[in-house]
Image: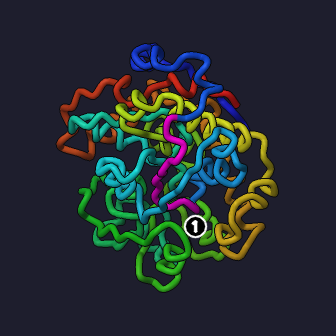
């Protein structure tokens, strides 16, 4: 995998300084305050969340003394609701949620970046490719997303706005994160979809879709957003980090171990670790999907200032509540734990 190192904007360290005092170096060897941890995710089989599955299946959570229970929801917005409501401790979810919540006065902060590019692909059914040649042709169409309000929905709406349409010019339909999404395309329930691998790879392999936009790579991401666009992160309530600094550090340690493992893993390695059902019945296809998406994983767990600015630009464009928002970068991402992580 080609890895690029991004400079971290100096503003990203503001919050780290405020939390650094709660995490003495000896904490790495201490027992977690809360060893039984509830983690939420929306669409765990998706390659977008592969670091979570790797941390679980390779035993990285257990190595850190954590007994993790993972709750998989239909979409990321449901995971966020669980965290706000107190039924979850940690979420693997889209970075944008930290910005939205900070703007609403909810102190939600990302502590580890998992994906520096969204990895989302917008595609249409092959039989409609002659009618839908670009995003400008999406008016009146039914588009599958993992769930309304999720990052797949957000990206589709942003792409519509950039092509002169309104966000409600197409109907967004939740199709989940796995086989249900594939079935929705094959049964003509939807005209296209904004989705992720391995779903996209499966549909490409079967010749069912034509790709319009692809953010699995830096080039595709910059073409749409004008910069990197942080995707999956690990986020928590800041209060949780203050009350459970050792647990928080060990959680990030596990995710950082997963990112390091992914950075050198072969497609065969990954296919051999994930649950059989993730392969959608085709191991070779899953391995190809991993190759397609490998560039998107973070090399260092950091959200950059450039990435923050790119995401803020999207949200200010899409959400009237955020059009004039002033949410400082250092409230959305705390680099303390990723910088201190032992991998």
For the C terminus, the quadrant is top right
- The relative height of residue 150 versus residue 303 in the rendered view (above or below) is below
Q: Residue at x 51, y 20 (%)?
A: 23
Q: Nearer the viewer, residue 177 or 210?
A: 177
- The relative height of residue 88 versus residue 2 in the rendered view (above or below) is below
Res. 88 visible in picture? yes
- The relative height of residue 97 versus residue 5 in the rendered view (above or below) is below
Q: Which residue is drawn at 52% across and 57% down?
A: 70
Q: Is residue 38 magenta?
A: yes
Q: Nearer the viewer, residue 189 or 50?
A: 50
Res. 162 visible in picture? no
* Residue 12, horizontal then vertical, whole percent: 44, 20
How many marks the image carries: the answer is 1
The colour scheme used to paint the residues is: rainbow
Residue 303 appears left or right of 45: left
* Residue 128, horizontal then vertical, whole percent: 46, 76
Residue 109 appears left or right of 139: right
* Residue 167, horizontal then vertical, whole percent: 26, 57
- Determine whether the residue tagged by mark 1 lies in a helix, strand or loop: helix
Q: Nearer the viewer, residue 168 or 293?
A: 293
Q: Which of 173 and 217 is in front in this view?
A: 173
Residue 54 appears left or right of 118: right
Please state the extent of the stretch shown in magenta in the rendering. 33-45
* Residue 91, horizontal then vertical, whole percent: 45, 47
Q: Residue at x 42, y 65 (%)?
A: 74
Mark 1 sits on what residue?
199
Graded by Cα atoms within 10 Å as few (under 14), some (14 to 19) or many (20 or more), the crowding at tag 1 reads many
Q: Does the magenta stretch include residue 145?
A: no
Q: Residue at x 53, y 29 (%)?
A: 246
Residue 107 appears left or right of 42: left
For the N terminus, the quadrant is top right
């Amino acid at each position: 995998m080609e890895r690029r190192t991004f400079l971290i904007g100096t503003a990203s360290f503001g919050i780290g300084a405020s939390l650094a005092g709660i995490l003495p170096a000896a904490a790495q060897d201490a027992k977690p305050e809360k060893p039984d941890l509830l983690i939420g995710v929306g669409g765990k089989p998706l390659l977008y969340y592969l670091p979570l599955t790797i941390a679980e299946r390779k035993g990285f959570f257990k190595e850190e003394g954590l007994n993790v229970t993972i709750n998989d929801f239909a979409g990321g917005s449901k995971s966020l609701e669980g965290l706000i409501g107190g039924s979850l401790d940690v979420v693997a979810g889209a970075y944008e949620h930290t910005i939205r919540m900070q703007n609403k006065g909810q102190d939600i902060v990302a502590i580890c970046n998992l994906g520096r590019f969204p990895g989302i692909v917008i595609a249409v059914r092959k039989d409609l490719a002659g009618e839908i040649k670009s995003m400008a042709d999406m008016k009146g169409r039914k588009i599958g997303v993992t769930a309304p309000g999720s990052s797949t929905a957000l990206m589709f709406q942003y792409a519509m706005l950039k092509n002169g349409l309104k966000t409600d010019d197409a109907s967004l339909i939740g199709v989940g994160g796995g086989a249900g999404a594939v079935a929705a395309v094959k049964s003509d329930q939807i005209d296209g979809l904004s989705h992720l691998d391995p779903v996209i790879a499966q549909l490409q392999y079967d010749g069912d879709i034509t790709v319009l936009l692809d953010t699995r790579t830096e080039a595709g991401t910059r073409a749409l957003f004008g910069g990197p666009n942080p995707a999956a992160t690990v986020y928590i309530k800041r209060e949780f980090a203050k009350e459970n600094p050792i647990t928080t550090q060990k959680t990030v340690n596990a995710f950082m171990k997963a990112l390091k493992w992914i950075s050198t893993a072969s497609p065969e390695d990954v296919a051999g670790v994930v649950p059989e059902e993730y392969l959608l019945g085709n191991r070779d296809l899953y391995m190809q999907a991993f190759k397609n998406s490998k560039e998107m994983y973070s090399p260092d767990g950091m959200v950059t200032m450039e990435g923050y600015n790119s995401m803020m630009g999207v949200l200010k464009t899409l959400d009237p509540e955020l059009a004039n928002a002033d949410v400082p970068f250092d409230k959305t991402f705390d680099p303390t734990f990723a910088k201190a992580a032992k991998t």
